[in-house]
Image (cartoon, rainbow, N blue to C red):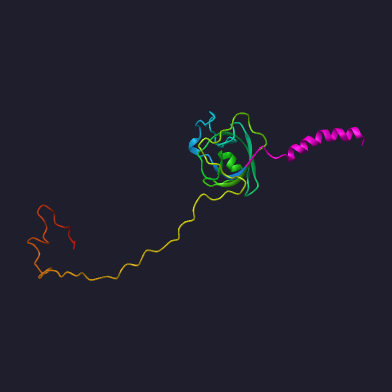
Amino acid sequence: MNFSTILRFLAIALPALLASCAKPAYEERGYASYIAEQYAGRYTTSGAIYQPLGWTAAHNTLPFGTVVKVKNNGNGRTVNVTVNDRFPYYPNRVINLSRAAAQEIQIPYHRLGDVTVTADTVASGAAPVSNYGAPPVNRSAPPRTAYKAPKPYHAPAAPSSYRKPTTVPPAGYGTSPPPPGFGTMPAGIPPPPPGYR
């Protein structure tokens, strides 16, 4: 191999090698969720129509058009999606995926998945600090749960023992005869069928 061939190889391989080792322009770890099916066919914040089978996502800080790679940290599966929407702030929720994208990385419906979101380049345009005024969150650590531990269960106190009533019924209570006509059929009602007791 001559010197010019080695230089040609390095000129081609070195930029690709450096690009693969470079730190991504954006990296964030947190929870991913589905975009609800009720939004199918509606306009997203960017003006595009949400399609559950599209490779799209909602993100609160990246500019629209940014392509991000979402990696499920539980199973290692990845998917590339384009940011075209925003979503309300939830603690540690970093991205909201279309149904197709969430199924691709095996996030169950109505569940959250621990993911890492990376982007090699950020689309042109100013990225908002946040659409919903979310406070800054440290994204370098694994997401913490946003829910408090339930309080321990305490059984209700045992009922107090039965106490007899303190009042005495009046004399003759419950010994008076029934009122007149008690136990007889009212007028206008047919008699019971034969054999009825």
Residue at the left extreme? 180
Up/down of 150 relative to 1, above or below: below
The image quarter in which residue 97 lies? top right
Q: Position of residue 63 (x, y in %)?
A: 59, 32
User: What residue range appears in magenta?
Assistant: 1-27
Q: Is residue 51 above or below residue 115?
A: above
Q: Is residue 171 left or right of residue 95?
A: left
Splitting the image into 4 quarters, where does residue 28 fall? top right
| Residue 43 lies in the magenta stretch | no
Name the image quarter holding residue 46: top right
In percent of width and height, residue 140 lies at 62, 46
Q: Residue furthest right?
A: 2
At which x and y percent is residue 85? 54, 34
Lateral position of residue 90 relative to residue 24, left or right: left
- Residue nearest the viewer, comparing 126 with 152: 126
In which quadrant will I find the N terminus?
A: top right
